Image (spheres, helix red, strand yellow):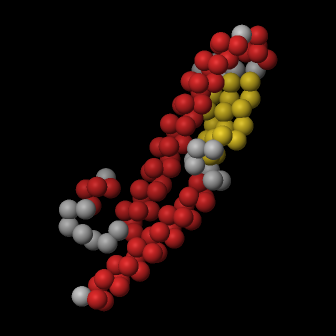
Amino acid sequence: MFGDMMGMMGKLKETQAKVEATKKRLDTVTLQESSSDNLLNVTITANRVLKEVTIDDSLLKDKEQLEDYLILTINSAIAKATQVNETELAAVAKDGMPNIPGMDSLFK
């Protein structure tokens, strides 16, 4: 019994280390998002850190329009980054979980 428990604890620590390594790697994964007309471009990491925003000069003439573009484009970039982040971390967690009957359905 203790051997199984020690084995599971070791596996959980290994998984935790893999999760941390994956989080660090996701800092280097960048995603690009653009407005539909490419007047605003955003670069974000898979850990949802905004890295760059480029704005076409034509958007600088209308404050409200620029604000709308920023909200839509940044929210879209965050959604994409969140999807990548969650997919990557779920894969690591699923791979590292001990085989407990019924638990496999949680990570599908």
Which residue occupies the foreground of this view, 26 or 67?
Answer: 67
Instruction: Give the residue at x 46% y 75%.
Output: 14
Which residue is at a point 50% across and 64% down the rendered structure image? Answer: 19
Task: Look at the picture and state if 2 lies above or below 58.
Answer: below
Residue at the farthest top position:
62
**Residue 69 appears left or right of 14:** right
| Residue pictured at 57% horizontal, 49% vertical | 47
Tell which residue pokes out farthest to the right in this image.
Answer: 57
- Residue at the image position 50 percent from the left and 36 percent from the top: 79
In this image, 7 relative to 42: left or right? left
Q: Position of residue 9 (x, y in %)?
A: 38, 79
Residue 103 locus on image (x, y percent) = 25, 62
The spot of residue 90 in percent (x, y) is 41, 56
Q: Quadrant of residue 104?
A: bottom left
Q: Height in image: 17 above or below 41?
A: below
Q: Is residue 103 above or below residue 71?
A: below
Identify the image quadrant of the N terminus. bottom left
Can you give x and y, in whole percent of width and height, for residue 42 in the image? 66, 33
Task: Judge from the rendering whether residue 106 lies leftward or rightward of residue 85; answer left or right.
Answer: left
